[in-house]
Image (cartoon, coloured by chain):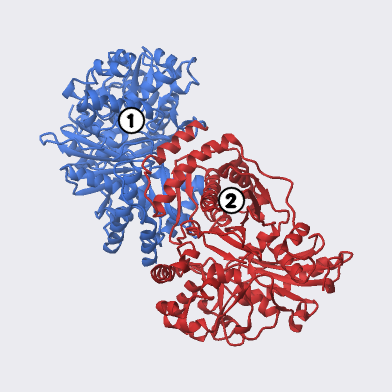
Chain colours: A blue, B red
Amino acid sequence: MFYSDEMSSFSLGVDYGTNSVRALIVRCKDGAEFGASVYQYPSGNQGVLLDSKDPYLARQYPGDYLLGLEKSVRGALAQAGARRGFSASEIVGIGVDTTGSSPLPVNERNVPLALSGKFRKNLAAQCWLWKDHTSWQEAEWITGKAVEHRPAYIAKCGNKYSSEWFWSKIWRCLNVAPRVFEAAYSWVEFADWIPSILAGVRDPLLIQRGICAAGHKAMYSEEWGGLPDAEFLKLLHPELAALRSRLYAKAYDATEPAGHLCPEWAKKLGLSAGIPIAIGELDVHYGAIGSGIAPEALVKVIGTSTCDCAVVAASNKVADIPGICGIVPGAILPGYYGIEAGQSAVGDIFKWWIEKICGGDETLYAVLERKAKKLHPGESGLLALDWNNGNRTILVDPMLTGLLLGTTLHTTQAEVYRALIEATAFGARTIIERIEEYGVPIRRIVCAGGITLKSPLLMQIYADVTGRVMQVAGSSQACALGSAISAAVLAGAHKDFPTAQAAMTSLKSKEYTPIPVNQRIYNELYVLYRRLHDTFGGKEAADVSQVMKQLLKLSIGNH
Amino acid sequence: MFYSDEMSSFSLGVDYGTNSVRALIVRCKDGAEFGASVYQYPSGNQGVLLDSKDPYLARQYPGDYLLGLEKSVRGALAQAGARRGFSASEIVGIGVDTTGSSPLPVNERNVPLALSGKFRKNLAAQCWLWKDHTSWQEAEWITGKAVEHRPAYIAKCGNKYSSEWFWSKIWRCLNVAPRVFEAAYSWVEFADWIPSILAGVRDPLLIQRGICAAGHKAMYSEEWGGLPDAEFLKLLHPELAALRSRLYAKAYDATEPAGHLCPEWAKKLGLSAGIPIAIGELDVHYGAIGSGIAPEALVKVIGTSTCDCAVVAASNKVADIPGICGIVPGAILPGYYGIEAGQSAVGDIFKWWIEKICGGDETLYAVLERKAKKLHPGESGLLALDWNNGNRTILVDPMLTGLLLGTTLHTTQAEVYRALIEATAFGARTIIERIEEYGVPIRRIVCAGGITLKSPLLMQIYADVTGRVMQVAGSSQACALGSAISAAVLAGAHKDFPTAQAAMTSLKSKEYTPIPVNQRIYNELYVLYRRLHDTFGGKEAADVSQVMKQLLKLSIGNH
């Protein structure tokens, strides 16, 4: 099959986010969007199962994923069907991306335990959502054991294993819900499980697992023969060592298919059976592809959290970068090292402030955006740490929390809103500086995600704080587009990823250029941010005794 | 005149707060309230003139004071007049208390410059309200010069002269509004000016000034012959040295009258001309008297800010206490040293949070109070510094600002509300510990002010954090009552203050006792609070790197 001259082939991308799933149908030739549909997960709080006694817990009901798959794809097809030149039979492949690391326990038939009657309501039997931090203690233990016994493993993870990742979560399950652990035949990443369902895989051992989640979240590397060796896992817990053989021996990059659409799901979705299904990847990795990732570019996918992606040609040598979550060959683009970093809460922080604290709704977002835009950098005298959901990069510490400093009796909602945006911008700068410090140059920054369009203020602040031009991905659905691109390449609609990206992705014409006067003030504020960051981050105590006064002086100077 | 057997004599107390003035008519025999009336100042924002460009500025229009005097007294008289056994002619004296240090510039006829056409709208010509912090720079300079040249002066002020005080403000006026300074013949404390107006004093040099504001705010002490000597003032500015002779040579305690009611104001108010007017004192000092201040008791007047008062018999020796704003003989009770400390914002912080940030109104206070009450100490994982209006005691630094640490994406309005109450409680504990450390025992704590009745939660937290029983003053109008007591003593209705206090003040039956389990948790939190306090206060850097983690552990432990 080679579709490059076939002008009417289409590709389907399915993007599973934290609160909803989105299906997108694009034309392979040019990436034109023919149909899109979003389905909100019905369970829990906006799709997330919570525990009022434990703010760290975040789970999801896998049944929502299946229902959402059908609803979103059917919705997108209905929309595309109304357009000339489209037919569902011309969809040549399916790509899927999801949040992660979001592992779920399954039985021997690849059925999630949560879909069986016995464990239906058991929180430990659900999908352990990426932002679940209940396993912070296990993460610390894994880090400790790895530092001592397998330094190579942990160096690849930025020297700290995260509570958000695969092994921490599974071990946590073993510790707090041993009956669930025992009932689980295997554990599957959400990103691998959806393609396996589409492909009709009934045995967890036959699932084609993606290198992306494996390498970034499960300490998988061909350097040491795949997953962490059994001896090391035994140091953690014998049951984890025993689980190893029921996981996977090899993980694949996007040149390999996850499988082909099985008749059952072809019928459910109204698509042709047998079309290829791309290997599952983490949402942001396909998002990076959909945003035009290439060497020397950094793609920032800004949503509830932010994920930063960069790629380096596999022919180059890349050093381990302390505090950067992972450097994995083939994780994003085949033939390249994928580098991933991130911030655990971005949009989520603004949402918390506006909805939970200020008690506002959508209209308050617009009001605060407008008011905050009128403020000068430094004017409010505020400085915040963006750690309301812990710090992922470069401190890799889920036990850190948010901080707001410099409040007076006059501090307004809009001033804090702006300070929170600035805090995420300072966090972004810290990541960029760390990556460059270790020899990976960043010459372009492309931002994707809804916030890039909803908040021009955020985009300008990011430009001013980082001192770099911020470009915006042309598609507002970069993750789904990236999934669709992967499927299009797999189906042969394009000869390789760079060719497919050139044809199917674009940039918005509007880009954000640093304003020198703002940059100067933000450079001063960044020094103060780093003092708080380093002091409270436990890295290196800085002198913070004058921070309040320096902020006040900046505030008075910039009124 | 000796009225002790005269069962129908009454006394009038007039209490000028930050947003309103209150008149209170009480029976001398037993303190029974016969009439009360409150008048809200009409100018500015709830009576305070602000400058949107400078959050430190807070002024008041003196015309509001005069109008409010008439309105509130007339209102109280109308109410009392409806009761049997009352006649305005039986009011035997008037006492006045005000905020301070709140100096205002007057001309040679004792008329405020702000009441003349020329300066009517000039912010520098208004009364410089206690909480105006525009003169922080001048305060630093005064501290510097005093440390170098007059260490005795500054030791008496707790080793730091405040931007809230007399000389800082006047010097600031000279620096930023020299025309106003030049037009001012003299400067008068608000607390001295109202009695002088009632007494018909037309020459600023004839005003009887109170020792209370003089000693606590203007570096007045008989040890060095009154106000700071001219040579020292010249080191600040020659114009300040020149002003010295147009201020006052001697200040008086409450055994001396400020004067007697002049016919003009007797007519305006409907009172008998010639009745004695007590010396003006700062609101909290008369509030302390109205709350039953006595040796070994600490009176906390909790309002927008908190003021702490203690007295020590003049026969004892009292050491200077670092960071305590002043120790002044006769300042509160004649025959005793008055010790004053305070917190720059208390009620104001809650108001800021609930109204300005959460966008709520009176009903939200009740909601948050109810929700916050359900939380356990430590449960929220939050820790705050109560410095939204700077720190008065023990850091004496208006350039400090508020801090909130430990926020997550789940942090609620009520959790922050409770954390802010706790922050003020930790601040209160810091003051108590400092006073005791320097040899002044505190065996009882009496709280006064509206919050003591409105927030049982706050009272319980104060008991739990300080580990002491919190008593509540019987009168909800302790300041006005204290003024009335001073007038009653002056008029001879009681032979001295202790006798008058025994007859006219009381305690509520409800008192708050520490709950041991809460105390234990708060002792742990207080250690963390002090680390932040000392680090950001610039006193002594503590290790704060683990504060977030320790809070989280306390949070998980106390859910």
Disc number lying in front (2 or 1)? 2
x and y percentages locating residue A267 in the rendered image: 38, 22
* Residue A269 vs residue B208, the one in the foreground: B208
Residue at 56% across / 59% down in the picture? B317
In the shown orientation, is residue B462 left or right of residue A29?
A: right
x and y percentages locating residue B349 in the rendered image: 54, 55
Badge 2 local density, few (<14 within 10 Å), some, or many (20+)?
A: some
In the image, farthest residue toward the bottom: B108
Q: Which residue is mark 1?
A: A88
Q: Chain of mark 2?
A: B
* Quadrant of the rendering where the N terminus of chain A is positioned: top left
Residue A108 in sight from this viewpoint: yes
Disc 1 residue type (three-letter): Ala
Q: Report the disc number at residue B441.
A: 2
Disc 2 residue type (three-letter): Pro
* Residue A160 vs residue A201, the one in the foreground: A160
Q: CA distance from mark 2 to mark 1?
A: 85 Å
